Image (cartoon, rainbow, N blue to C red):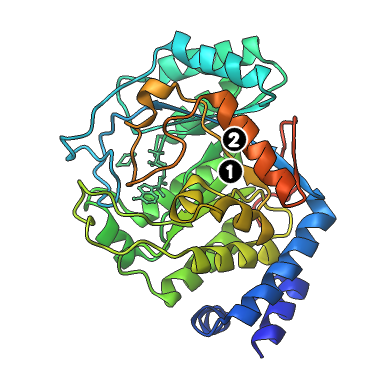
Amino acid sequence: TLITLIDQLRDTHLLSKEEWIFLIENRTRDVSEYLFSQAREVRHRHYGHEVYIRGLIEFTNYCRNDCIYCGIRKSNLNACRYRLSETDIRNCCRTGYELGFRTFVLQGGEDGWFTDQKIISLIEKIKTDFPDCAITLSIGEKERESYQAFFDAGADRYLLRHETYNSTHYGKLHPPALTAAHRQRCLYDLKEIGYQTGTGFMVGSPYQTAEHLAEDMLFIQQLNPHMVGIGPFIPHHDTPFAAQPAGTLELTLFMLGLLRLMIPKLLLPSTTALGTIDPNGRELGILAGANVVMPNLSPTDVRKDYALYDNKICTGDEAAECRHCMEKRMEKIGYHVVVARGDSLNTETIP
Ligand code: SAM
Ligand code: FES
């Protein structure tokens, strides 16, 4: 009946909460293999064997928030703080453009130094420099007016993981000032404004249960986003979760496969965190249904300081090395990296 549930998900894209829990709790190696084969088939139908690449620019690690799991939370006084200048960021884009990137992801902590005006100016300059590129923002929770202003300035996409749908669980991962409801409100705002919107969650975050994951899947189905970023939780030694176990490769891959069947046209990255818990993690993510990778374009001298978790990979590599490494890794498993914006095919609007 596990196989029946996977077939049902593939054919109707619908499972009840009880069915999600049952599937997640009773998964086996054989069931996973079946899931991945179905997920690949669906992925190939819509996206072929192409892998979209996003150039990730981690432009500041200052953050006003204090998410318990995060290595750059404001309470971590050991974090070595940096912010890139506008010129640095545009140079990262230039390097990336020459390497074939047509999407730039500007990610950072919630850093008040980067006012809305500064972000807008940055977006306008990048759009002028590279009119054929998409800009993705990943800078946390903002007022709807700010999201609108960034969109009007030319930003195309926004990544904001909901982290966990369940508000009690959310409360165990965040300080009281941050709420699940507000995070979710932001996601609906982003989608309504017209962004290609990405949500997501950590797999194996402290205190997470199968029921929480079921709720995450139901929330994602409701939101119907364009992208979903998931990766294992990995402890950072300078956080209160230092001694918590990391999420597993196995469960992360399983969730990737389920996401592909639930929303066939999703943009689904095989994340750096997945590559960090297993040397073949990103390849296995692609083979479980993912279709995006996000190599790092940040300057090498700041890479190690954007430490969300321990042992993050690629912190010493030049952008060009990461780009070529990714190409080789994908070719090896029968996929190829393409030079394209890689827009989402999931274009239906809010239900
Ligand atoms: N500040 C922005 C935000 O809140 O969306 C973007 C940066 S934030 C560091 C990006 C993502 O990193 C978070 O959504 C979270 O899921 C992930 N992350 C943070 N700490 C992590 C950890 N210890 N292990 C795995 N992922 C982590
Ligand atoms: Fe702000 Fe992690 S606490 S980016």
Q: Is residue 65 left or right of residue 145?
A: left
Q: Secondary structure at mark 1?
A: strand
Does 89 appear above or below 254? above
Residue indicated by mark 2: 157
Counting from the top left corner in percent of width and height, residue 103 is at 64, 29
Q: CA distance from mark 1 to mark 2?
A: 6 Å
Q: Quadrant of the C terminus?
A: bottom right
Horizontal and vertical percent position of residue 237: 22, 49
Q: Position of residue 299 (x, y in %)?
A: 44, 21
Q: Residue at x 40, y 34 (%)?
A: 143
Name the residue nearer the viewer: 331 or 41.
331
Which residue is located at x 56 percent, y 66 percent?
Answer: 255
In the picture, residue 256 is in which quadrant? bottom right
Q: Residues within 10 Å of mark 2 (few under 14, many from 20)?
A: many
Q: Cβ(mark 1) to ligand 1 < 8 Å?
A: no
Residue 347 seen in render: no
Q: Is residue 8 left or right of residue 95?
A: right
Q: Total number of numbered labels?
A: 2
Dividing the image into four quarters, tell me where ligand 2 lies.
Answer: top left
Asked whether residue 185 is in view, the answer is yes
Which residue carries the number 1 mark?
197
Question: In which quadrant will I find the N terminus?
Answer: bottom right
Judge from the rendering whether residue 336 lies leftward or rightward of residue 124; answer left or right: right
Placement of 211 over or under 53, stated as above or below: below
Counting residues from the N terminus, which is met first, the one under dot 1 or under dot 2? 2
